[in-house]
Image (cartoon, coloured by chain):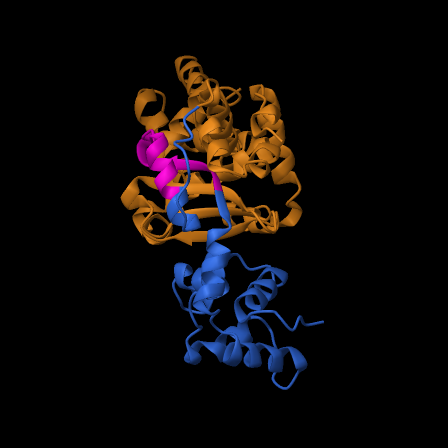
Amino acid sequence: MDPVSHLRTYTLTELEQIAANQLKSLGDNFTIPVDIEDIVEQCGIDLDIKRGSADRGIMGQIGTNLDTGKFIIKIDEKLFEARHNQRICRMTIAEEFAHFLLHRKTIENVKTYEDVITLKNHPHWHKYERNAKWLAAALLMPAGHVLNDSRELYKQLVSSVGFDNPIAVKKYIRNLLADKYDVSVSAMKYRLENWPINVMDKIDQAMRDKLDFLE
Amino acid sequence: MSDKNESFGSYLKKLRLESGFGLRRFANLIEIKASNLCDIEHGRRRMPKERLEATADVLGLEKGTSDWEHFFELARTRGELPADVQQMAERRFMPALLRTIDNVKLSDDDVKQLIEEIQGRKIIGDGSS
């Protein structure tokens, strides 16, 4: 079967919903930071390491065992082990897992080298990749939790430092949340600045109006 | 019920997941590197003898039970898969999607070479689309 025939793009609302459903299914096992490795394994995906793949520029890969059909995510060993790389490693695993959630049928129908090349050179591949990146961010930084935490932090901060320096307040909130969710500062910044959270605009507005809460 | 073809690694992984431990957390608890635990579970490496008892403890295996016996029996006899069995399993992996550092684009030749290496065979034709 042609693997490309299963490809489709998702709206941002759909991606947020997929992430929310996936995290909801964890029930009591839901934690912050999200334990993405545990989620991957609980979905029956084999999480493995690959030695030396970063030397050829590859951080992660997802595929199947051609005999058993089992899904496998392989992460470069150095990326997997290095403490300073943990946030990149988590995002890499989340992005591979996002592809599993979005393009499972496609991945399981990749059987030959030609299929891999067809997929890699697909004219709309960048759109599918963007979808996977968005879903990965929504899994690691769940919108509702991030927004609630932002509100809490904002309230605490302005009660002690006032309303004079919105840049510092935003930077402080961004950095604290990046630590809490164990993601890079740039990933958290992007998440905070965009739908469905848009908290940076809310902070600007609230500080202009000297409000000690965020809408 | 135990499977007679089961390896130590797959049994260990099954017990770990049933006990609700993630790979990294479990590796920390039994004081080995996460990548080494990954190797052990995939039959590429033996569990160090001195870590076996502690591992059984963390998994809640009680001394003298059939699970305890099975765990140590597998560690002794099927701790590491034979190289050809390992290689066969590795060669059946088909990487559908490859994530590169800084989103560097791989050429078709790079991908071809990578799959040839994984599968241990030459791919006929250039496969260009």
Q: Does residue A49 appear to the left or right of A139 in the view shown?
A: left
The image shows residue B74, relative to residue A6, as above or below, that is below
The structure residue drawn at horizontal position 36% and vertical position 52%, both measured from the top left corner, is A77
Q: Does residue A77 appear to the left or right of A12 in the view shown?
A: left
- Magenta range is B95-114
Q: What hue represents chain A?
A: orange
- Counting every numbered tag in the picture gives 0
Q: What hue represents chain B?
A: blue
Asked if residue B101 is among those painted magenta in the image, a careful observer would answer yes
Asked if residue A138 is among those painted magenta in the image, a careful observer would answer no
Residue A127 at what x, y percent from top left? Answer: 48, 20
Location of residue B100 by image quarter: top left
The image shows residue A119, relative to residue B53, as above or below, that is above
The image shows residue A187, relative to residue A56, as above or below, that is above
The structure residue drawn at horizontal position 44% and vertical position 28%, both measured from the top left corner, is A120
Residue B84 at what x, y percent from top left? Answer: 46, 65
Location of residue B19 by image quarter: bottom right
Q: Does residue B66 appear to the left or right of A103 in the view shown?
A: right
The structure residue drawn at horizontal position 58% and vertical position 26%, both measured from the top left corner, is A15
The residue at the far right in this view is B1
Residue B105 at what x, y percent from top left? Answer: 33, 29
Task: Work out which quarter of the rendered image holds the N terminus of chain A and state it.
Answer: top right
Residue A108 at what x, y percent from top left? Answer: 59, 39
Location of residue A172 by image quarter: top left
Report the front residue among B29 and A198.
B29
| Whether residue A149 can be seen here | no
Report the front residue among A147 and B33.
B33
The residue at the far left in this view is A55
Report the front residue among A100 and B121.
B121
The residue at the far front in this view is B124
